[in-house]
Image: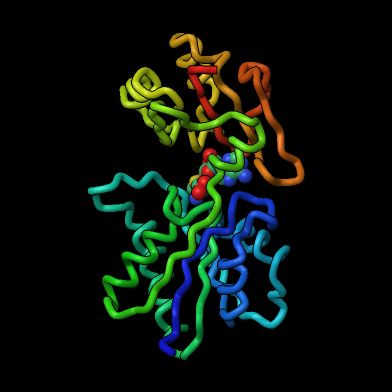
Amino acid sequence: MKPTLYILGTGPGDPELLTIKAVNALKTCSVLVTPKGSPNGNSTALSIVKQAVDTSEKKIVELYFPMKKIHIGYEPDQEVKKAWMNAARTVLSLLEQGKNVAFPTLGDPAVYSTGFYLYENILEINPDTKIEFICGITAMSSCSAATAIPVCLGDEMLAVIPATFKDQRLRQTLNTFDTIVLMKVHKVLPHLCTLLSELNLLNKSVLVERAGMEDERVITDLTSLSDPPHYFSTIIVRKKR
Ligand SMILES: C[S@@+](CC[C@H](N)C(=O)[O-])C[C@H]1O[C@@H](n2cnc3c(N)ncnc32)[C@H](O)[C@@H]1O
């Protein structure tokens, strides 16, 4: 069988939220290529996998992907593009050696994940590469479960956005949708609190930090935080409660 790359979601942190399909695919792979956001840091996706699958016999290649803003439709930053191409070449070389490769990524690969950039860059070099996606549980779903807040019911409209928007899109989205899931909130919380207060949405907002992880926190008063929350933090703004 042709060697395959599995781009798979690990879920947001709790290893029990890895799907059986993802675990089975991981077991068939002799190599794990895992993303990490800082050169000397650890891969969270890998740490989740390690709690569910025996990786002692597997080759592990940790690759650094710089965390920079990506504007879809525009050329990425050169450092980012270099990291994507390096990852693509690394994976292609492993596949050429006849190995099945897994690329585990936090949450779901379809939501703000490096998985699809890797996919596109590999296909740019070799369009015949065999790649399968295995979906994962999103951070949003885990935050919803942690707070018992649904994200959309009945005729409600849901928006999922990075909270780092600098233009009017953030305000417009907050005004337009019934539930707004704000990702990547950690660096912009003071600005968000001001905006949410101005739109009378502060008391409709809940922040979940490290959902599904051991030190999960649910914060209902966003203004009570004296320090920035962890990078793994998401806010659900639900208007109709
Ligand atoms: C690069 S995105 C990854 C999203 C992921 N692919 C998904 O499906 O949810 C990173 C953002 O996801 C959110 N996130 C990831 N893991 C989380 C967790 N365990 N708890 C809360 N938010 C989390 C945070 O908003 C974080 O800034």
Q: How are the residues colored?
A: rainbow
The reply to whether residue 78 is in sight is: yes
Query: What x and y, as percent, mark residue 210?
Result: 66, 41
Looking at the rendering, the quadrant in which ligand 1 lies is: top right
Residue 132 located left or right of residue 59: left
Q: Residue at x 45, y 9 (%)?
A: 198
- Farthest residue in the right direction? 214
On-image quarter of the C terminus:
top right
Against 86, is 94 above or below? below
On-image quarter of the N terminus:
bottom left
Residue 34 located left or right of residue 170: right
Total marks shown come to: 0
Which residue is nearer to you in this view: 29 or 233? Answer: 29
Query: What x and y, as percent, mark residue 153?
Result: 47, 29
The reply to whether residue 41 is in sight is: no
Residue 53 located left or right of residue 125: right
In which quarter of the view is residue 208 placed? Answer: top right
Q: Residue at x 63, y 38 (%)?
A: 145
Query: What x and y, as percent, mark residue 90?
Result: 44, 77
Q: Residue at x 53, y 47 (%)?
A: 138
Q: Residue at x 42, y 47 (%)?
A: 68
Query: What x and y, as percent, mark residue 167?
Result: 32, 25
Against 194, is 64 above or below? below
- Farthest residue in the front direction? 154
In which quarter of the view is residue 235 placed? Answer: top right
In which quarter of the view is residue 176 placed? Answer: top left
